Image (tube, coloured by chain):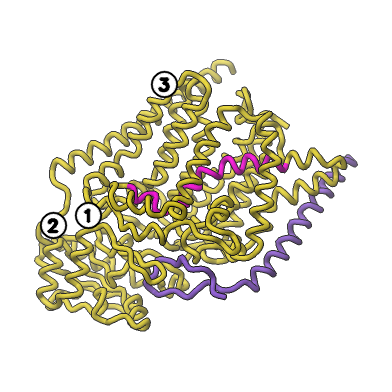
């Protein structure tokens, strides 16, 4: 029983670590440069993001 | 841990609990990924265009004048949505595809480690390939991707167990709804059989025959289009693998990304996070290599390794050997299939998922403190999500479902009424450009949906524009009509269109206005089309629909298939249907015999 509780707690810690990583990535993403503007006709763009 | 089907020599069925884990986890990830795409309505993104009722028509069989890019996927959807409504069918298909991908990767991992399977399944479902192909709407390719683990598991059994042929053929059919999908699936199936480690000449022959049979429709339709089956070599550079953020094209491809279209790349991939993600995946895969050498079969390593190598080489070929690929595309019919080479990265994903899973499991084993090992293993196993969180939900809203404007249904009814009055021919969609950004689709880019929305064969532009550069299409009829729209007007244009077999013309007013607002000449692309006395059968805010030509539709169209060509195409469809039908009958027979034996034992 004790082992199971310890296991669940450890998994919870792992999930918290992943969530913290996610928060860090989301804050990086929110400050990332925007995609370049495209023409109405464009299928897509093979140009990089606009700085 | 219980034995799994994918284990060496394991034939016993896993317990129910262990069969539910992969489904539950994959379903959770799939729902997170699809998000608003599972809401009411239809997802329209780039090449993914679903409509309420996709009506059956000749072009879906490969009879049209354009290359059979949507053969047989459109046919399958047109048949299936007679049973399940289009919107629901799309959601079921997207969700089912992702769940199959995750559960397949789970089973592919050798050994008893649950954490290995858990991590493999996560990476296989949550990686740049899946996200970018969802974004660009390549759902048939994602079906191929989902089927790859299952194809390998069936194919490797085939040399020793003839009963594996039927499941293998059924998985191949599931995976072969597009030309590239058929190639990718066929390559893996044949390689897995050849590498299975037993004398396999008969099994290889059967597998190859099944691949040929299932892909016969698009192969035949493509061959019958002759010179149109070659493509503009300029497209190779535009569709080549593309760097993502700090990653050069080859490194982006190694991380299962690198799609040509920067617009569908998640923002997280354009930052330094992409480098961290690639480093983490590669180091973990390297750690998993030793486990794969000891736990896995040599035949698995050989088969999955060979196809992974091929997939990576094709993916970066447009970058490292653009001239050669350009020559192939311009001179060899069908070689245009490799111009968007990163589609073949699907072949790299299975081996990467297996190695990643085994690497995570090895790290967990290496940590002496159990609690610490579990925490680290959990964090690592879900790291693909943590490092690309903007894939959820629905690619940050890019896949949210929308409804078609009510006016579309009114225009469709007008066309149906006209057809019932005896008018015939194809529908020409204007403006004569391929893609739209409708306001009702939240300004998100989509292939012109009108062609599929209306219930008749259609003619639309097949010229692509990438970053302002035009890539010529392959359909000679579309090229002629494009010239006629530029040079003719009034009755002369109406006659010319009728001679091309056009019976109706529909103009998307919003798309036309958007082009004019962007400075495009109002007389180009049929924006301000003048059809003389052609009868207007619908005039609304969004759409205008005209009847063109004589009441019985257009005149004879040149460039369509002749009688013998149609017979050859019919033969190809019979071959595909026969292959699929035989596999279905065999599978049902085996299932029936098994259940009868179980009843006897009971």
Tally of marks = 3
Marks 1 and 2 in Cβ contact (< 8 Å):
yes
Which numbered circle lies on residue B65? 1
Residue B49 vs residue A14, the one in the foreground = A14
Residue position marked by numbered label 2 in the rendering: B557
State which chain disc 2 sits on. B
Question: In the current view of this chain or complex, which residue is farthest to the top?
Answer: B601
Q: Residue at the spot x=13%, y=43% of the render?
A: B563
Q: Nearer the viewer, mark 3 or mark 1?
A: 3
Q: Residue at the spot x=81%, y=39% of the render?
A: B366
C-alpha distance separating marks 1 and 2: 10 Å
Which numbered circle lies on residue B308? none
Q: Position of residue B294 (x, y in %)?
A: 68, 29
Q: Quadrant of residue B457?
A: bottom left
Q: Is residue A14 left or right of residue B261?
A: right
Above or below residue B597? Residue B134 is: below
Q: Quadrant of residue B405?
A: bottom left
Residue position marked by numbered label 3 in the rendering: B201
Q: Is residue B56 visible?
A: no
Q: Which chain is yellow?
A: B
Q: Is residue B124 left or right of residue B546?
A: right
Magenta-drawn stretch, dominant element (helix, strand or loop): helix
Q: Position of residue B125 (x, y in %)?
A: 58, 49
Q: Drawn colour of chain A?
A: purple
Q: Position of residue B449 (x, y in %)?
A: 35, 64
State which chain disc 3 sits on. B
State which chain disc 1 sits on. B
For the record, the magenta segment spans B335-360
Above or below residue B543? Residue B128 is: above
C-alpha distance separating marks 3 and 1: 39 Å
C-alpha distance separating marks 2 and 3: 47 Å
Give the class, few, some or many, for how many residues have Cα within 10 Å of label 3's Cα (few <14, many ≥20): few
């Amino acid at each position: 029983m004790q082992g199971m509780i310890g296991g669940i707690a450890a998994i919870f810690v792992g999930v918290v670590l992943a969530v913290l990583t996610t928060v860090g990535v989301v804050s990086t993403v929110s400050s990332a440069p925007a995609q370049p503007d495209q023409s109405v006709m464009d299928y897509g763009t093979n140009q990089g993001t606009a700085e | 841990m219980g034995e799994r089907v994918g284990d060496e020599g394991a034939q016993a069925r896993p317990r129910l609990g262990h069969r539910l884990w992969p489904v539950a986890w994959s379903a959770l990830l799939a729902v997170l990924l699809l998000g608003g795409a599972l809401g009411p309505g239809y997802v329209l993104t780039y090449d993914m265009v679903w409509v309420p009722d996709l009506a059956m028509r000749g072009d879906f069989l490969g009879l049209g004048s354009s290359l059979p890019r949507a053969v047989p996927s459109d046919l399958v959807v047109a048949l299936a949505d007679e049973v399940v409504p289009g919107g629901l069918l799309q959601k079921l298909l997207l969700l089912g595809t992702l769940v199959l991908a995750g559960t397949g990767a789970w089973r592919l991992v050798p050994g008893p480690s649950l954490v290995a399977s858990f991590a493999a399944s996560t990476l296989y479902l949550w990686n740049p390939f899946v996200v970018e192909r969802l974004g660009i709407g390549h759902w048939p390719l994602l079906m191929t991707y989902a089927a790859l683990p299952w194809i390998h598991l069936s194919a490797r059994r085939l040399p020793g167990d003839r009963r594996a042929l039927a499941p293998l053929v059924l998985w191949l059919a599931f995976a072969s709804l597009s030309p590239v999908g058929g190639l990718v699936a066929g390559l893996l199936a044949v390689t897995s059989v050849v590498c299975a480690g037993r004398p396999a000449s008969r099994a290889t022959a059967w597998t190859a025959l099944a691949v040929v049979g299932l892909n016969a429709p698009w192969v035949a339709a493509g061959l019958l289009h002759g010179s149109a089956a070659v493509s503009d070599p300029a497209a190779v550079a535009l569709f080549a693998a593309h760097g993502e953020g700090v990653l050069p094209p080859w490194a982006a491809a190694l991380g299962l990304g690198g799609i040509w279209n920067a617009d569908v790349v998640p923002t997280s991939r354009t930052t330094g996070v992409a480098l961290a993600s690639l480093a983490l995946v590669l180091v973990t895969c390297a750690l998993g290599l030793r486990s794969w050498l000891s736990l896995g079969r040599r035949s698995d390593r050989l088969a999955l390794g060979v196809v992974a190598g091929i997939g990576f080489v094709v993916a970066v070929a447009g970058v490292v050997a653009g001239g050669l690929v350009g020559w192939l595309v311009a001179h060899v019919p069908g070689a245009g299939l490799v111009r968007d080479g990163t589609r073949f990265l699907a072949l790299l994903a299975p081996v990467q998922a297996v190695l990643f899973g085994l690497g995570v499991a090895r790290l967990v084993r290496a940590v002496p403190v159990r609690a610490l090992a579990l925490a680290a293993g959990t964090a690592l196993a879900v790291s693909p999500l943590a490092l690309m969180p903007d894939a959820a939900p629905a690619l940050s809203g890019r896949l949210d479902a929308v409804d078609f404007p009510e006016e579309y249904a009114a225009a469709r009814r007008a066309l149906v009424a006209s057809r019932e009055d005896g008018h015939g021919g194809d529908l020409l969609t204007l403006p004569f450009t391929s893609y739209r950004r409708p306001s009702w689709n939240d300004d998100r880019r989509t292939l012109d949906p009108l062609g599929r929305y209306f219930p008749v064969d259609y003619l639309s532009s097949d010229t692509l524009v990438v970053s302002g550069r035009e890539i010529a299409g392959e359909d000679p009829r579309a090229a002629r009509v494009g010239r006629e729209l530029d040079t003719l007007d009034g009755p002369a244009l109406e006659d010319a269109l009728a001679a091309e077999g056009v019976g109706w013309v529909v103009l998307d007013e919003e798309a036309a206005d958007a082009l004019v607002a962007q400075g495009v000449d109002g007389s180009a692309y049929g924006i301000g089309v003048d059809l003389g006395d052609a009868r207007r059968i619908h005039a609304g805010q969004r759409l205008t629909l005209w009847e063109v030509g004589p009441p019985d539709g257009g005149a004879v169209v040149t460039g369509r298939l002749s009688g013998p060509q149609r017979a050859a195409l019919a033969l190809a469809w019979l071959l595909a249907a026969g292959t699929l039908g035989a596999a279905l009958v065999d599978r049902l027979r085996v299932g029936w015999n098994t259940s009868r034996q179980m009843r006897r034992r009971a």
